[in-house]
């Protein structure tokens, strides 16, 4: 990242802060194991993550909110493993966040300016919400300043900027047609600094923590896809990791909310599930203390981590015409039925082959018996 830009130059270490708050070594290692799993690393990397966090200093973080519903902040506040208290006080040094910080008014703005001035090139900036560009950006102002001006200054002086959620990534719902405020994502107005996108409405805070832990462990930001999203969180298609995938393969679909298939956890493709063309780690990262996720709770995926999802994935409760990745636009019916038939055919073939082998073995035994009699 260049000289003078190492996050690990601030005070105290992550592990020291955790110990001061009474976090046991066991819980610390559980967190490191969780981060290894989040980063799609083997469990053997947990000790390496632990070693890095024992030495790494807490990075300074500022959180900007623009055109948003506060959903990503809500996701942040409902974080677990670690809890939000652990994140705020131990993993990150959150020096500016309008929703949760103690100072207000001019004191709050001073906190932000102190970070920008005194830690230039050393802090992480998280942006939540879209940035309006029409009419000079007057449609979103904070402290008398347009969001676009704040973003250019704060993001432009950061070590790296993380666009948290769909709105900050590509404009999200505020940019949906006809987009009266000219709302755009961070990447459309900021350049010259690394930008990590965390699509989703909202994004899962485990991916934010994973991004920071990756830097603290390996000294670099995680590898990203073509959308600038970290591969560890957005490199797998939801459909491929979904717990309902076996029902899809078997051709078992929910046809109506509350029907037998719905009660038995069958595939939600016909209810409009966008999992077959959405890339995100929802099935493995989970939500609500890692107990469930929308599809697991019986609701279809709406594709909120996909580009311009409000325009491209609606209507949310209508099924996709076809599924990518299965040859020439194979429909769900054909894929499910075809796989079911293939499976049945395989079982039948196996049974025939087994019966044939048994018949041949029986004939051989008879020949052997006749030979011995002679």
Image (cartoon, rainbow, N blue to C red):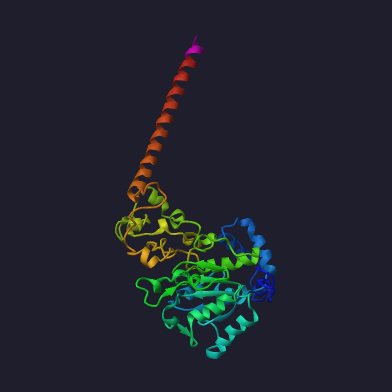
Q: Where residue 103 sits: x, y (%)?
A: 55, 87
Q: Is residue 245 left or right of residue 82?
A: left
* Residue 362 vertical placement versus 90 (above, below): above
Q: Where residue 212 sits: x, y (%)?
A: 59, 68
User: In this picture, which residue range is highlighted in magenta?
Assistant: 370-374
* Residue 238 vertical placement versus 209 (above, below): above
Please report the residue visible at 65 percent of the width from the left and 69 percent of the height from the top. Answer: 24
Q: For residue 13, what is the image quadrant?
A: bottom right
Q: Residue furthest front?
A: 135
Residue 128: tell me if it is visible: yes
Please report the residue visible at 37 percent of the width from the left and 77 percent of the height from the top. Answer: 180
The kind of secondary structure the magenta stretch mainly shows is: helix
Residue 206: tell me if it is visible: no
In magenta segment, residue 371: yes
Q: Residue furthest top?
A: 374
- Residue situated in front as seen by the camera: 278 or 226: 226
């Amino acid at each position: 990242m260049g000289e003078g830009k190492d996050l690990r130059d601030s005070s105290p270490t992550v592990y020291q802060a955790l110990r001061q708050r009474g976090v046991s070594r066991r819980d610390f290692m559980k967190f490191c194991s969780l981060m290894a799993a989040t980063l799609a690393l083997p469990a053997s990397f947990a000790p390496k993550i632990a070693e890095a966090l024992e030495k790494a200093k807490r990075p300074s973080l500022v959180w900007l909110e623009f055109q948003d519903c506060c959903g990503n902040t809500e996701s942040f506040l409902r974080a677990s493993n670690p809890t939000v208290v652990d994140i705020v006080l131990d993993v990150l040094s959150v020096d500016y966040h309008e929703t949760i910080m103690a100072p207000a008014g001019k004191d709050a703005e001073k906190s932000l300016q102190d970070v920008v001035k005194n830690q230039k090139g050393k802090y992480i900036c998280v942006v939540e919400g879209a940035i309006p560009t029409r009419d000079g950006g007057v449609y979103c102002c904070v402290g008398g300043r347009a969001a676009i001006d704040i973003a250019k200054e704060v993001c432009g002086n950061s070590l790296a900027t993380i666009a948290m959620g769909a709105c900050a990534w590509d404009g999200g719902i505020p940019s949906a047609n006809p987009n009266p405020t000219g709302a755009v994502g961070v990447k459309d107005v900021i350049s010259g600094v690394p930008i990590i996108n965390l699509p989703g409405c909202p994004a899962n805070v485990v991916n934010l923590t994973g991004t920071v832990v990756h830097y603290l462990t390996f000294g670099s930001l995680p590898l990203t896809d073509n959308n600038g999203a970290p591969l560890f969180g957005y490199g797998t298609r939801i459909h491929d990791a979904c717990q309902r995938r076996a029902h899809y393969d078997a051709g078992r679909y929910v046809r109506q909310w509350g029907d037998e298939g719905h009660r038995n956890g069958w595939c939600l493709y016909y209810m409009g599930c966008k999992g077959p063309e959405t890339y995100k780690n929802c099935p493995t990262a989970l939500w609500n203390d890692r107990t469930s996720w929308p599809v697991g709770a019986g609701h279809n995926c709406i594709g909120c981590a996909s580009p311009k999802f409000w325009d491209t994935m609606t209507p949310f409760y209508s099924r996709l015409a076809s599924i990518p990745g299965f040859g020439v636009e194979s429909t769900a019916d054909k894929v499910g039925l075809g796989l079911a038939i293939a499976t049945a055919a395989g079982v039948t073939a196996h049974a025939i082959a087994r019966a044939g082998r048994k018949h041949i073995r029986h004939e051989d035994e008879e020949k052997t018996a006749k030979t011995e009699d002679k």
